[in-house]
Amino acid sequence: MIKAATFLPKSAAEPVEWRVEPGLTAYEVATALMESRAETIRAGTESELIWLVEHPPLYTAGTSADPRDLLDPGRFPVHQTGRGGEYTYHGPGQRVAYVMLDLKRRTEDVRAFVTALEDWIIAALARFNIKGERRAGRVGVWVVRPDKPPFPDGAPMEDKIAAIGIRLRRWVSFHGIAVNVEPELAHFSGIVPCGIPGFGVTSLVDLGLPVTMADFDIALKQAFEEIFGPVQTVRESLLEATA
């Protein structure tokens, strides 16, 4: 397993900017802003950024999306996106963290980067005594559900609690992770999430934990600093700052 410390900066660097966007952010606006910020990070004119948002209900299709996995195409807007992966759902109650990091300052290894993102989610969930796990061939983070009927072979059911979909441009990342805090889980039924049939989707609240988004953001920040290094919180809305 890749050690989390792999993704600390190679040398002294300014902290990663950490912003939490209030309200719901339109997906196309977020995408345009990420594209622009990735360019300025590569140029060295702006710092790395973690941008936490919530979106209105929508589906996104990654570069590997199979149209047959869009089960209810008229339910919510569908956005084609350049990130890796297949179909996923975003909506209120789900914490989306857009990750804009320069891997040239860290480690130029895509697989290790995805592992570090999984480590980040797993470490944040552990702060609520949730055991998040990775599975070979299934990107994202999973939890075992002994409270649900097992698979036909007797193996315990597993639900997905977090998705990962990234893109790199000249070693600067954008897109990122999505963790289910308290979204409407029924909205996932319009797709085959991440193209993986036969598994459920869960959230912190679904698991019986009355966790608020603010609670989870604290855990997410603490875990990020352990794996990727220090952050500097900027309280101003990024949308307002770039308007």
Image: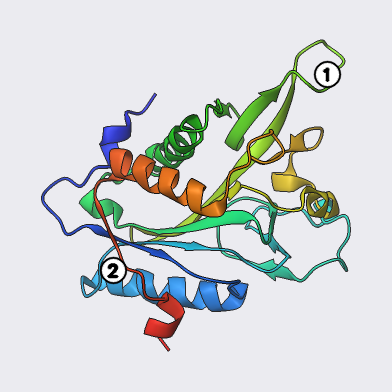
On screen, residue 77 above or below 242: above
Counting from the top left corner in percent of width and height, residue 165 is at 55, 51
Counting from the top left corner in percent of width and height, residue 87 is at 71, 54
For the point 55% across and 78% down, the residue is 29
Counting from the top left corner in percent of width and height, residue 232 is at 26, 60
On screen, residue 159 above or below 7: above
For the C terminus, give its image quadrant.
bottom left
**Residue 161 or 22: which is nearer the viewer?**
22
For the N terminus, give its image quadrant.
top left
Residue under label 2, please give it: 41
In the rendered structure, the answer to whether residue 90 lies left or right of residue 83 reads right
On screen, residue 196 above or below 82: above
Badge 2, how many Cα within 10 Å: few under 14, some, many 20+? some
Residue under label 1, please give it: 151
Identify residue type, mark 2.
Ile
Identify residue type, mark 1.
Phe
Q: Quadrant of residue 90?
A: bottom right
- Coloring basis for residues: rainbow
- Sequence order check: which comes first, mark 2 or mark 1? 2
Cα separation between marks 2 and 1: 46 Å
Counting from the top left corner in percent of width and height, residue 18 is at 35, 61
For the point 30% across and 44% down, the residue is 225
